[in-house]
Image (cartoon, grey):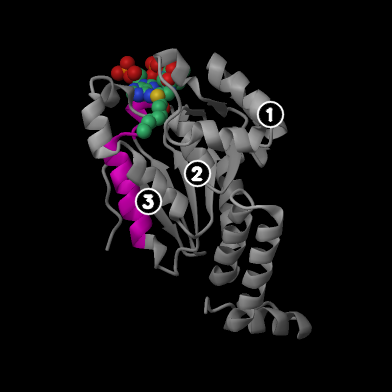
Amino acid sequence: MPDTYSTLLIERHADGYAVVTLNRPESLNALNSTLLGELVAFLDTVENDDSVRCLIITGSGEKAFAAGADIKEMADQTYAEMYRSNFFSEGADRLARFRKPVIAAVNGFALGGGCELAMLCDIIIASEKAKFGQPEINLGVAPGIGGSQRLTRLVGKSKAMDLILTGRTMDAQEALASNLAARVYPHETLLDECRAMASKMASQSLLALMANKEMVNAALETTLTQGVQFERRLFHSLFAFEDQKEGMRAFVEKRKPAFKHR
Ligand code: CO8
């Protein structure tokens, strides 16, 4: 079935990854309910599809990854409406639960909900034109899709306070130096570099990719002792998979492994 959405462009690649492009360029890819609903639908579609083993999320147009939640959609909402609909929680929670690796290819503004979306991904790769920030304070509000928590864990309390309380933006080099971004590339090569990264990940055993992601995420949720124990048990359990036998045999036989994702 074709991936047809009104706010997302989907490109599935034969190497085993898909590129999800947030496609509301007229609003700098601001996140609205339709876009998040479509993201949930796409994640549901590919969660159990082994032909997609890694995702790249990026923004359409030259300027933005996503310039935040859609302020025009939010402006007149009442507290009762926000509370009753549990505004935006479905999209954010679904991405946080997604079990395969997700790369955020940040090609411009990643502000407010856009920065939070990038942090919900597993790896942030920035173009030299990327600008990150949590400017909600300028609107008289605050981060609402996890920014106060995830940014603080990634960059530390002092820098998180600096960004959140002043509402300023930081450029790609500062994001790299602050451990928010893993790598920075020239704007023109960002997507190609992310594709190469996704292709490399998609060539691995999907089961191992998922287990590795689960382990790293556990580091943010548990004590060191519990996290190390979780890693050890998950490591042991990988020996139940054919891919472990194939990976180790291939090394011994000096050939490339042919993983079957089982
Ligand atoms: N929402 C809606 N429309 C937007 C948004 C947005 N977040 N950002 C930009 N746009 C629209 C503009 O209104 C404009 O539309 P139009 O042409 O109809 O006037 C179009 O995109 C182009 O934008 P600009 O003309 O402003 O472009 P500039 O290059 O001059 O400026 C900026 C770019 C600096 C990025 C500027 O657009 C800006 O400041 N945008 C808002 C950034 C922001 O405040 N983001 C945070 C939003 S709040 C949020 O994300 C809360 C998340 C928590 C949700 C809680 C759920 C529980």
Q: What element carries label 2?
A: helix
Q: Dot 1 lies on which element?
A: helix
| Figure disc tally | 3
- Which residue was labeled with disc 2? 120
Dot 3 corresponds to which residue?
Answer: 10
State the image coordinates of residue 30 (x, y, percent, origin top left): 37, 30
The magenta segment is 24-45
Identity of the residue drawn at 34% across and 58% down: 44
Task: Say if residue 29 shows up in the picture.
Answer: no
Percent position of residue 143, x then y: 45, 28
Q: Is mark 3 within 8 Å of ligand 1?
A: no
Please tell me whether residue 216 belongs to the stretch shown in magenta.
no
Question: Which amino acid, mark 1?
Answer: Gln
> Does residue 37 show up magenta in the picture?
yes
Left or right of 38 in this view: 226: right
- The residue positioned 58% from the left and 66% from the top of the image is 211
Task: Give the quadrant of residue 153.
Answer: top right
Q: List the residue tagged with mark 1.
A: 173
The amino acid beneath tag 2 is Leu
